[in-house]
Image (tube, helix red, strand yellow):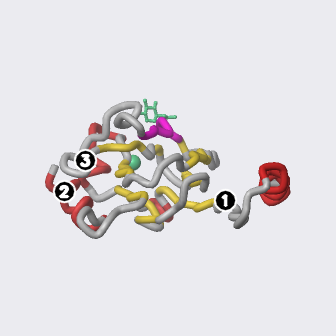
């Protein structure tokens, strides 16, 4: 369906090189871990990210690079917050967001007043060579 829609849009707009939006699937809490997997992705504008909440009760919430934990409710300006997604008792919620810019977005779980975040439950969208996922993770563990 996404393919068909993109085809139609490209034809109607007469867009020259046709690029299809991609979806990035990110697992949250796989195997009861306090982790996102993968820990970083490099999507383009128009791509989507689907957070699949597999265990426990977590969030994917945007935060700052320098002081990640806890992420603010609602996320930082220009970011997003999936809200708490409870995967206990057979629930398997998922939340999809659309990428609207190429800026880095720093993401962490805001459960337990930042305790999950400080355990390293972090994820990066479009980290850069000067602001790496590894440094973001280190900042989270120290915050
Ligand atoms: C999920 O966590 C939030 C924040 O701690 C809490 O308010 C909510 O009740 C939890 N949901 C469930 C179903 O336990
Ligand atoms: Cu969590």
* Res. 21 mark: 1
Q: CA distance from mark 3 to mark 2?
A: 7 Å
Do labels 3 and 2 touch, CB within 8 Å?
yes
At mark 3, the secondary structure is loop
Q: Which of labels 1 and 2 is toward the front?
A: 1
Would you identify the image quadrant in which residue 125 lies?
A: bottom left
Mark 1 vs mark 3, CA separation in Å: 29 Å
Most common SS among magenta residues: loop
Residue 92, compared with residue 127, is above or below; it is above
Q: Position of residue 27 (x, y in %)?
A: 53, 60
Q: Is residue 99 magenta?
A: no
Q: Which residue carries the number 2 mark? A: 139
In this picture, which residue range is highlighted in magenta?
A: 79-85
Percent across and percent down for residue 44 are 54, 60
Q: Residue at x 32, y 34 (%)?
A: 72
Q: In percent of the image, x 73 and y 63: which residue is there?
A: 16
Which residue does the image show at 38% across and 44% down from the upper left? 62
Q: Is 13 displayed left or right of 104 in the figure?
A: right
The earlier-in-sequence mark between 3 and 2 is 3
* Badge number at residue 68: 3
* Badge 3 density bin: few <14, some 14–19, many ≥20, Cα 10 Å: many
The N terminus lies in quadrant: bottom right
């Amino acid at each position: 369906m996404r393919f068909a829609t993109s085809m139609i849009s490209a034809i109607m707009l007469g867009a020259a090189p046709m690029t299809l939006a991609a979806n990035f699937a990110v697992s949250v809490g796989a195997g009861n871990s306090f982790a996102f997997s993968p820990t970083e992705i490099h999507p383009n504008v128009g791509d989507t990210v689907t957070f699949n909440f597999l265990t426990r009760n977590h969030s994917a919430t945007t935060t700052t690079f320098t002081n990640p934990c806890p992420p603010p409710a609602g996320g930082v300006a220009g970011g997003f917050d999936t809200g708490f997604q409870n995967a206990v008792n057979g629930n398997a919620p998922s939340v999809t967001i659309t990428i609207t810019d190429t800026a880095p977005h720093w993401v962490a779980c805001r459960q337990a007043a930042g305790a999950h975040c400080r355990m390293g439950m972090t994820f990066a969208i479009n980290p850069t060579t000067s602001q790496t996922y590894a440094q973001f993770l280190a900042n989270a563990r120290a915050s």
